[in-house]
Amino acid sequence: MVVNCPLCGYRFDSAQAVSCKGCPINSDCSKICCPNCSYGWVNSSSIVDSLLGLFKQGKKNGKP
Ligand SMILES: [Zn+2]
């Protein structure tokens, strides 16, 4: 899967991205590190979607 670095805009295949080494517990996390600028972010749109879903649910339920 080709991803775009949100920081520098570098495009690369996520398979090329080296998983971050800052997670001793979960070494196989979904964090992607840009090979160009070393910026790391979590490429898990599912989490974002679930968060957005929670926000939508909160609005539907009338919660602030
Ligand atoms: Zn980058």
Image: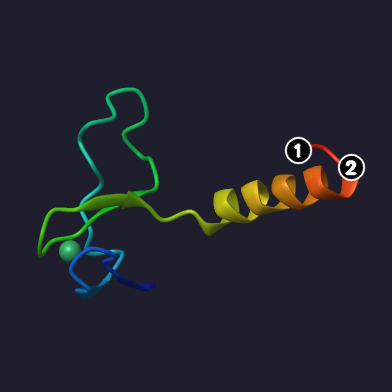
Pick the front one: 23 or 8 = 8
Instruction: Give the quadrant of residue 10.
Output: bottom left
**Residue 11, percent from left and from top:** 24, 76
Distance from disc 2 to disc 1, alpha carbons, whole Å, reads 9 Å
Residue found 38% across the figure and 41% down from its top: 29
Please state which of residues 21 and 7 is positioned toward the viewer in this rendering. Answer: 7
- Give the quarter the ligand 1 occupies: bottom left
Residue that appears at 76% across and 52% down: 56
* Location of residue 15 (image quadrant): bottom left
User: Is 57 placed left or right of 33 in the picture?
Assistant: right
Few, some or many residues within 10 Å of mark 2 (<14, 14–19, 20+): few
The amino acid beneath tag 1 is: Pro
Residue at x 22%, y 31% (from the top left corner):
22
Q: Residues within 10 Å of mark 1 (few under 14, many from 20)?
A: few
Mark in front: 2 vs 1: 1
Whole-percent x and y of residue 58? 79, 43
Residue tagged 1? 64
Count of numbered badges drawn on the protein: 2
Secondary structure of the residue carrying tag 2 is: helix
Q: Is residue 52 left or right of residue 13?
A: right
Q: What x and y, as percent, mark residue 14?
A: 31, 65
Task: Classify 19 as above or below 34.
Answer: above
Q: Quick one: quadrant of the C terminus?
A: top right
Disc number for residue 46: none
Residue type at mark 2?
Asn
Q: Quadrant of the N terminus?
A: bottom left
Q: Is residue 57 left or right of residue 45?
A: right
Q: Residue furthest front?
A: 64
Q: Residue furthest right?
A: 61
Identify the secondary structure beneath mark 1.
loop
Residue for point 66% across, 53% down: 52
Q: Label 2: which residue?
A: 61
